[in-house]
Image (spheres, coloured by chain):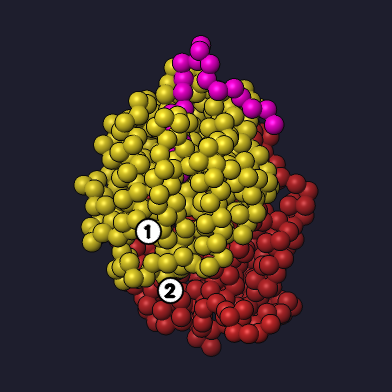
Chain colours: A yellow, B red
Amino acid sequence: MNRLPLPHVDSMGEIVAGCIAPHPPHVVYADNPPQNEPHSEGGWETLRWGYTKLANKLKTLDYDALVIFTPHWQTYIGTHFLGLPHFKSKSVDPVFPNLFQFNYDLGVDVELSRALHNATKEAGMVTMMMENQDFRIDYGTIVSAHMLNRDWDKPIVPISSNRSRHYYSVEVMNEQARALGRACRKAILESDKRVVLVSTHSLSHRHFTTEPPIPEDMSKQHIYNHSNYVWDMKLIDLMREGKMQEVIDLMPEFTEQTMAETDSGSISWMMEALGMPDYPAEIYGYQSVIGTGNVVAAWDPNPETREVVL
Amino acid sequence: MSESPICFGLYVPPQPHPLLAPEQNEGWGELRSAFDTARQRIEESDADLILVYSTTWPSIIGHQIQAHPEPEWTHVDDDFHFLGSMPYKFKMDTDFADGYNQNCGERGLHSRTIAYDGFPIDTGSVVALKLLNPDNRIPACIVSSNVYSNRAESIVLGKAARDTLQQQGKKAVVVVVATLSNRMFTEHIEPHEDRIHSAKDEEWNQKIMEFFSQGRLEDLSQLSREIHGQIRVQKVVAYKPVWWMAATMGQSNNYDGEVLAYAALHGSGGAVIQLTPTSGSFGDKEFDEDDVEIYSGDRDVLDKGMI
Ligand SMILES: [Fe+2]
């Protein structure tokens, strides 16, 4: 496997952190931000407090943009990037519309987006810039961006998820996502940008198909089954131990066994873009949301600021 | 036997090309003309309702039923955003939506109506309703496709729709939004390069259209699992649209079938097909699997010591 070198002296660009940031709309609903129309009585504190701690850490880092790989902008014809600087609209979750009707007004770093697009294209992948101003930003991007940066004071760069898992297999998905990660790493290091990478997804991803009358009734929240729990813990243990190559090698089986949302390729993309970390992840919290398993985690390449959180 | 609550059924493709770019490819234009013919036939019918089941509207919490009286937005497709935007304003039959939701419950299904400003109506539903009912002359209803549901749920969902039509004394045009083979090209193609993705997909599409043109909807329903294995990219657990369509229309092979157009849509099989109830029958050929009236959930056989 070709490894790209770490940033050298001529490189201006830098990846300052990578985050797993799950996007059940429940966490935004539970947070009651002014942008979201439904009102809740709270819920999912373990995830939300973890998110707050990670967001506070990101505040201490000097970065220019959040680059977010999202499972909910699903493309079958290659990987798409946003090519317009500003989007203002309302995002209503198609699955949980009762929880998420979020009014957003956000900026895109189009220069960086285009650089990622061009590098991906040069690496031989199918790509497209999205330049339709009526396009609605998906809720995976919005939930993760909001929870990591509630002030929305940094531009974002969303990347669509090509559904090669459906068309081919989890193995093909894993390899394509890794190739995308290598291309994005190269583009970022050659740019003058400092970025935070965001891989937004649950781990195990089997949902309950019914919802309690009070969605935030925490007495009803638990993992869908024990098998999914054991798999989630296995992955988190490997993350703690800094064995990300092993996590990525397990990705096809984990994804098959737990219907994991890693089928989008987002974690494979991020680990490759981070240069496949061999240092411990910072674990900020794990909790079930309507049956799915969700971890908030981060990789800090700088050993001086890397923490043992939980 | 009481009069059928179904004027006729339509099977139409979800991709936006017939709406946004019919002039760019002959086949897309033929699909558009077929949509226009179907629109005219709806106008000439005595339908009270257009009832849409869309495979591009996935749900997780049971099935969702659109109940906003006038949903309005400008939709853009995730892949085909470069073809343009799709502004829409539809008129929904909220009484039907409420009744349908209740009847789903009666038959053991979990379902809910949804009515939220800005709810993202899916590409397939937008394309179908804009082309088949451009002036909102007839109110509509849209029901989702649950990602985890399988045959029993889909059939019972269809029966609950039929219950509601009968209870409310309404006649409907039933619209299923789905491709035949659903494998698209994973690369950009020029419009003139469009063709069905593979010879195998083409062969199966022809077989399915032969069944449709003979009115053999129930036989197609019985063959659904085979179709799923042969020519469906495995995005969901099963090929469900003909299960729902057959159950809603009355579980028989008694139809006049007509394939109005068939063409490739970025490699997938797009067809506009009409099925009109008739008294004649092709006969029952493929009835293998049990019928189901009430959905009683997963049977949890592993938890009950069955093996
Ligand atoms: Fe998701």
Q: Is residue A248 in sight in this rendering?
A: no
Viewer-closest of A160 and B289: A160
Picture layout, residue B190 above or below residue A203: above
What separation in Å lies between label 2 and label 1 (alpha carbons)? 14 Å
Q: Position of residue B132 (x, y in %)?
A: 47, 55
Picture layout, residue B28 above or below residue A184: below
The label shown at residue A96 is 1
Residue at mark 2: chain: B
The label shown at residue B110 is 2
Quadrant in which the N terminus of chain A appears: top right
Q: Mark 1 and ligand 1: say if the CB distance to the nearest ligand atom is below 8 Å.
A: no
Specify whether residue A10 is painted magenta.
yes
* Category of crowding for the residue at label 2, using alpha-carbon neighbours closer than 10 angstroms: few (below 14), some (14–19), many (at least 20): many
* Category of crowding for the residue at label 1, using alpha-carbon neighbours closer than 10 angstroms: few (below 14), some (14–19), many (at least 20): some
Picture layout, residue A215 above or below residue B250: above
Viewer-closest of B289 and B124: B289
Q: Quadrant of residue B265?
A: top right
Residue B73 horizontal side relative to residue B192, left or right: left
Residue sticking out furthest to the left: A34
Q: Residue at x 41, y 43 (%)?
A: A308
Q: Position of residue B254 (x, y in %)?
A: 64, 76
Q: Quadrant of residue B100?
A: bottom left
Q: Mark 2 and ligand 1: say if the CB distance to the nearest ligand atom is below 8 Å.
A: no
Which amino acid, mark 1? Phe
The label shown at residue B297 is none
Which amino acid, mark 2? His
Q: Residue at x 24, y 52 (%)?
A: A32
Specify whether residue A121 is painted magenta.
no
Q: Position of residue A102 (x, y in %)?
A: 29, 47
Residue B75 horizontal side relative to residue B223, left or right: left
The segment highlighted magenta reads A1-20
